[in-house]
Image (cartoon, helix red, strand yellow):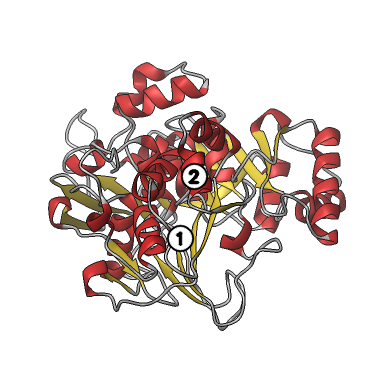
Amino acid sequence: MTGDTPSPTTLAQKIVARASARDHVTPGEIVTARVDLAMIHDSGGPRRVEPILKDLGVGLFDASKVVLISDHFVPGDTDEGARILELTRQWAKERKVAFHDGEGICHVVLPERGHLRPGMLVVGGDSHSPTGGAFGAYMFGVGATEMAGVLATGEIWLKVPDTILLEWRGRLSRGVTAKDMMLALCGRLGMDGGKYQAVEYTGEAIAALSMQERMTLSNMAAELGGQAGLIAPDATTAAFLETAGADMSGKEIWSALATDPGAPVLEHHVFDASALAPQVAAPHSPANSAPVTDAPETPVDVAYIGACTGAKYEDLRNAAAILRGRRLGKGVELLVAPASKRDQDRAAADGIMAVFEEAGARILPNACGICAGYGTDRLGEDVTCISSTARNFKGRMGAASSQVWLGSPLTVAASAIAGKIADPRAFLQDDGGTA
């Protein structure tokens, strides 16, 4: 510090300092932070945390700051799933928390229902909780035991993170999306490139992205091994949150929630968005990524458009623009699981869902489903799948013998038509309206 001028700090430091009731925090410090919101779901939520709370003899620190979402065992098409959903619903009534039942995947439903705001410190009972960072919130995932502690006390111990700055200059070309950016980052930096620190996305290409595309970036900070995936709030953020009905009080200070020029960061990587091609990741890791033009022309049996990273409204719209008026490749099964009921309804009103139906797609519930290996529609033995999910770990989506490739929703749609892994740019119409 020089005189009365504070040292420049990162966005992560600013949020953690506020939550810790401190003027300033330093990376590496251990602080006790007050939690603004806790999100749990049916899989790791009531059935896991309630026994711990009972053993402790405590209730919730503040029911108004807890959101429960059912998305893993939806639609309850197994005996186990039905039992867990019933337990979840009963717990929501007893504990009087905000409950979104079967409305979609938690990472999509939470912001679309207005629960997130810039500057919040949020914990989620799921590894892809960094999605909240797209809204300028410091959000990260915890296990059931730690979540029970949060629910009981409203606090969590936190090691103040360093920041890894990922700057994307230029603009993405047509047919290239945030999913391609993330697969390229996984290939370049590896799945431990985030070092369990705060990953922050910045640059011209990031500013040009829609909120749903930003959500994909923050979500997949988990695949980079980051604790959180942050994007500084701006007018795009505010417009989305206002539409979602979020509490807009304090909006006037959101502009200060940005990393200061000259703030010390652990690493600073610079990428050229204009040079990026569509990416695919070979089995069995997102880090096995390369340009689709370098991938072998692998035949596919299943094309899956689903998950919080690959089936939001804009994902559905982009995939449909490629599928419209075309036939699926011989023997290809197309599965579409919209990420939320709201996004599916919007897509239906815009004629997008009709495109999938006309192409012969099977529409699955608004849930995690195949992505996390839940439900009855998991991949069978020796199936090759091209998927818009975030992960392709061996056996995660079904049989251990299945082979899962990752790509953007556009790449999945193009591959469904070609019957093999394909470059989506070859299928874009002049009037396509795709990314």
Image side of residue 340 versus residue 9, left or right: right
| Mark earlier in primary sequence (2, 1) | 2
Image side of residue 126 versus residue 263, left or right: right
- Tell me the number on the disc at residue 139: 2
At x 38%, y 75%, the residue is: 282
In this rendering, the answer to whether 244 lies above or below 50 is above
Q: How far apart are labels 2 and 1 at the CA level?
A: 18 Å
Amino acid type shown at disc 2? Met
- Where does residue 22 sit, x and y in percent of width and height? 44, 35
- Evaluate whether residue 285 shows in this view: yes
Q: Quadrant of residue 183?
A: bottom left
In this rendering, the answer to whether 174 lies above or below 246 is below
At x 50%, y 47%, the residue is: 358
- Where does residue 434 sit, x and y in percent of width and height? 30, 42
Q: Quadrant of residue 16?
A: top left
Q: Secondary structure at mark 1?
A: loop
Judging depth in this view, the residue of 358 and 137 nearest the camera is 358
At x 43%, y 32%, the residue is: 119
In this rendering, the answer to whether 432 lies above or below 79 is above
Image side of residue 393 versus residue 155, left or right: left
Q: Quadrant of residue 77?
A: bottom right
- Tell me the number on the disc at residue 390: 1
